[in-house]
Amino acid sequence: MADSILRLEALEKSYGALLVTDRVSLDVRPGEIHAVIGPNGAGKTTLIGQISGSLQPDAGRILFEGRGVTHLPMHARARAGLARSFQITTILPDFTARQNVALALQAHQGHSFRFFRDVAKDEALNEAAGRVLADLSLASRADIPAGVLSHGEKRSLELAIALATAPKLLLLDEPMAGTGREETDRLVEVLSSLKGRYAMLLVEHDMSAVFALADRISVLVYGAIIATGTPEEIRNDARVREAYLGEEAA
Amino acid sequence: MENATASLFRARLVPGLILAAFGLLPVLAGLIDDTFIVFFAIRVMIFAIAAVSLALILGFGAMVSFGHAAYIGLGAYTVGILAENGVWEFYVSLPATLVVCGLFALVTGAISLKTRGVYFIMITLAFGQMAYYTATSLSAYGGDDGLTMWGRTEIFGSSMLSDRMTFYYVVFAVLVAVWWLCRTMVNSRFGRVLQGARQSEMRLQAIGIDPYAYRLAAYVIAGMIAGVAGALLANAAEFVSPAYMSWHRSGELIFMVVLGGLGSFSGAILGASGYLVLEEVLSHVTENWRLIFGPFLILVVLYGRGGLLGLITGGKRDG
Amino acid sequence: MSATLLAVQTLNGLQLGILLFLIAAGLTLVFGVMDFINLAHGVQYMLGAYLAVAAYGVTGSFWTAMLLALAGSLVVGLALELVVFRHLYDRDHLDQVLATFGVILFLGEAVKVIWGSSPLSLPVPDLLSGSIPISDGLLYPVYRIALIVAGLLIAALLYVLVTHTRVGMLVRAGATNAPMVSALGVNIRRLFMVVFGFGAMLAGFAGIMAAPILAVEPGMGDNLLILAFVVIVIGGIGSIRGAFLAALIIGLVDTIGRSAATDIARLVLPPAAANDVGPAIASMLIYILMAAVLFFRPSGLFPARAG
């Protein structure tokens, strides 16, 4: 359908007898933040893996901008505009923050079979990388090896790398994982400033962040989606309260 | 953070010193009238070329190829077999070497690079061994005993390479060119991808790069360079032997790169020099020099991270 | 090639396959459980043969020599584990490969110093001497038959050990998920030592069994080590079953290929060219087989690791 940028149709995956994705269908509309929440072991990371292409579903379809991408490898999906951030920080630790972002920009600019020009002296590339870093308040840390950045800075860099590929959809796998209160607030601010410019599928544990950011929320329990709706609807959904929110929502 | 002086030292001074040393060596050797040193230095430079090519894939791409000596052998055999059939011209033998080694690297690399880790090590080792056994079974070209070349490659009909000094500086020029080429590639967009893939395959996939083709390209380039080293080795020795591609040779090449310090081409050159000097010295001390060398190698692996380059600059190994 | 020759070559192929299996089994277990690549495994095979020759020189009995050499292989294996390998489990494969390469250089040279470079041999024990007829007018040595039978028995024993014992269960679990095994509170160090010692004894046993029929010389393990790698790549890392089948396949293909390649080449080439090309093709055969398997199944025929 034209009005959704990402659409999952009856996605299924199991590990042996364990059904980790149980006929999951959902869609993300242009400019929307759609959050997926659920208790530990609900199958959120497996779902992200299938959308980004690091895992193959057993059945069902994934449509990106109306095009079937179910069997495309991860790098091809990334090229099509599907950028993911990782729950466990996956940056290139020996590269500086700027080099990390520059590589993502470089990837977006086409093939890299360019053997002779010194990429460190490619001013256009470096400046573009600098701008992305500045957007995420990392300008002052641009030339520090990414491996020695603080945890919160690494989370921001992870986001910067995803943005550098000029994505149409951001697939965010627990972007706030392991960050402190202050860092979380900062990331929420960053994400809400990006709201409207990018469609986002946000998988997150931090409930206050999810309810602050999301336009719609889907609740995943034991691999199946039990409810989808606005934050207000989800807050008041009896099944969700029972299955997931429990005491917290009371 | 790394000491800036040490870094500058490594980037500029060490390469300069190495160049100066190899460039001036024949002059100094001439002063004391020592031909052995010149012959020995030619050998060192040839293995340095091969070590630099291995450093490209091993140090920057984390591809532990245990079959790199096969390319030295293939290069040497290409030159030797052409010569045996009366073709001596470099403008035939050089492209032939590049094509033979490039194709072998393309086919074996395309298969090996589908795998990771120990698989890659074992498969490259197996393909190297395949080349070795094939050479020993070439009865028309000497089989086990190898093949004597009755002369050296000619350059437009001139046998100038038979002059020791000319040959020395040709090898020197090739070393410098290869060194420059590899450094340039590592600093290019291509090099970024190669080094990024070493750090995280997943990250590259996620930004839209499939590292496979880039790894394969690096693997093929490294194979071709090692082939050139082999062609030079055949000329230096005027002899071609299956022993050039034994898996022990591949192991020694890896050791050269590690001994010099991973992740640096100057290191690879230092490592090749250090290894061959050590072998030369130890084999003068005792016929059973491997009794000393084996444990030395183990100690270097266990305690000598950073290699010779780290020792000189005092800096830590960069990646 | 006649049917008789084919029968003989098949038996020879099985025999090579059995030796390969004994070596590959230890290697693949060590890979699977410890993620450790041990290039020195071929040297342990060589040491088994040398120890048997030395022990025979002292005792004059093949069977006593075998027991002593087995014990010796175990002691050497455990000593290597203690002095060198133990420090390498946490290292990357590059370090493992290089350090074990150093062990090869050292032990290979040590063997030369102690026993010299010329080939030695071990007599076939009286019990297994002589030949038996396997078809009209064709005799096959009893010892070689015994080698094949012994190998098959060990393969069966290994299969039972891996599938029906506690250690075997841990080994299987370790091959699929090493962190989980260690999280279960198993003493990983001890498990490693057991697996390692066992692998060393298997390699040593292969060396002892090979001593009466192959030349005992420095470097005898090199060729078999690399063939064992090919076996593991084809069979799938960590899989005993894969190693067994792949070892037999490689043994048969290599042996029969070598005896038939020139004849086959003669079908399409003039005799002189066939005599040149045949052996070259024959020596490439198993590597081509490996490449083909990898092309279709990158993790081998029987991958032990899930996912």
Image: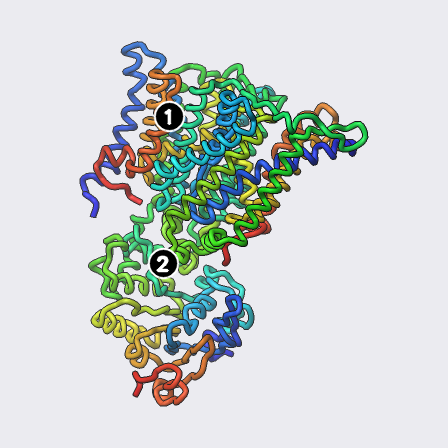
**Residue type at numbered disc 2:** Leu
What residue sits 32% from the left and 17% below the top? B26
Q: Is residue B11 visible?
A: yes
**Color theme of the render:** rainbow
Q: Position of residue A182 (x, y in %)?
A: 20, 71
What residue sits 22% from the left and 35% below the top? B313
Task: Using the image, determine if residue C42 lies above or below residue A227.
Answer: above
Dot 1: chain letter: B
Dot 2: chain letter: A
**Residue B4 appears in which quarter of the rendering?**
top left
Q: Position of residue C211 (x, y in %)?
A: 56, 27
Residue designated by label 1: B45
Image quadrant holding the N terminus of chain C, namely top right
Front-lying residue, A194 or A119: A194
Q: Position of residue C295 (x, y in %)?
A: 58, 48
**Residue type at numbered disc 1:** Met
Residue designated by label 2: A105
